[in-house]
Image (cartoon, rainbow, N blue to C red):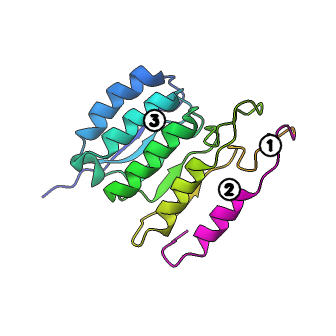
């Protein structure tokens, strides 16, 4: 039998939520998609939900190994949906990039309300026995509650949770 491995780079295409919905349908039906780069496509929270649903399809689950969603403004809710979906589905994803998505509820400017809910979801996955993650990128997400200019209110809860997950026997990072 022939094994077809597909790697798609659709970065910087500004699909927004509507485009994410169309992509989600294609992802759900693709058994050969191994790498998907959707960085800087303005997917947003709702697009994150659509992708989470697609990645939970039995066909896509067996396929995606690398998923780059950097710079999509997925936000806290979209990130939680994605992370919980990936964790529940036993997706073989080894590399996940959620950098620069405001997953803690804050924009790069420091606006919004801080929450570590998405970080907690990532930590649950890291602690899950048999998780496939080998690389998790969470940079530029204001994990400490402050932006690059120091605007916001500092907290260490997310970093502490990540440190706790990293020492878990199940963590492979």
CA separation in Å, label 3 and label 1 = 23 Å
Looking at the image, residue 26 sits to the left or right of residue 106; the answer is left
Is residue 15 something one can see in this rendering?
Answer: no
Q: Depth check: give the residue in front, 71 or 85.
A: 85
Looking at the image, residue 5 sits to the left or right of residue 123; the answer is left
**Viewer-nearest of discs 3 and 2:** 2
Q: Depth check: give the residue in front, 45 or 3.
A: 45
How packed mark 2 is, by other alpha carbons closer than 10 Å (few <14, some 14-19, many 20 or more), is many
- The region drawn magenta spans 150-173
Residue 161 is inside the magenta segment: yes
Q: Depth check: give the residue in front, 128 or 6.
A: 128
How packed mark 1 is, by other alpha carbons closer than 10 Å (few <14, some 14-19, many 20 or more), is many
Element on which disc 3 rests: helix
Task: Say which quadrant the N terminus sits in.
Answer: bottom left
Residue 156 screen position, x and y as percent: 76, 57
Residue 151 is inside the magenta segment: yes
**Marks 3,2: beta carbons within 8 A:** no
Whether residue 79 is situated above or below residue 65 in the rendered picture: above
Instruction: Give me the residue at 33% from left, 33% from top.
Output: 24
Is residue 61 something one can see in this rendering?
Answer: yes
Residue 48's mark?
Answer: 3
Q: Depth check: give the residue in front, 56 or 27.
A: 56
**Disc nearer the start of the sequence (3/1):** 3
Task: Say which quadrant the C terminus sits in.
Answer: bottom right
Element on which disc 2 rests: helix
Whether residue 100 is situated above or below residue 143 in the rendered picture: above
Residue at the spot of label 2: 158
Residue at the spot of label 1: 146
Residue 5 screen position, x and y as percent: 30, 50
Residue 34 screen position, x and y as percent: 35, 50
């Amino acid at each position: 039998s022939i094994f077809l491995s597909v790697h798609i780079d659709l970065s910087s295409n500004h699909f927004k939520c509507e485009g994410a919905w169309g992509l989600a349908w294609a992802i759900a039906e693709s058994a050969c998609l191994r790498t998907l780069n959707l960085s800087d496509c303005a997917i947003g929270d709702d697009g994150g939900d659509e992708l989470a649903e697609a990645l939970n399809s039995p066909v896509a689950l067996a396929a995606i190994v690398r998923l780059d969603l950097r710079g999509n403004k997925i936000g806290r809710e979209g990130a939680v949906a994605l992370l919980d979906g990936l964790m529940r589905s036993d997706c073989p994803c080894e590399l996940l990039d959620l950098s620069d998505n405001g997953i803690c509820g804050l924009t790069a400017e420091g606006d919004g309300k801080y929450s570590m809910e998405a970080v907690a979801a990532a930590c649950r996955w890291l602690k899950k026995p048999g998780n496939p993650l080998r690389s998790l990128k969470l940079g530029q997400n204001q994990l400490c509650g402050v932006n690059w200019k120091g605007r916001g209110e500092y907290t260490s809860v997310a970093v502490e949770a990540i440190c706790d997950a990293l020492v878990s026997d199940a963590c492979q990072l």
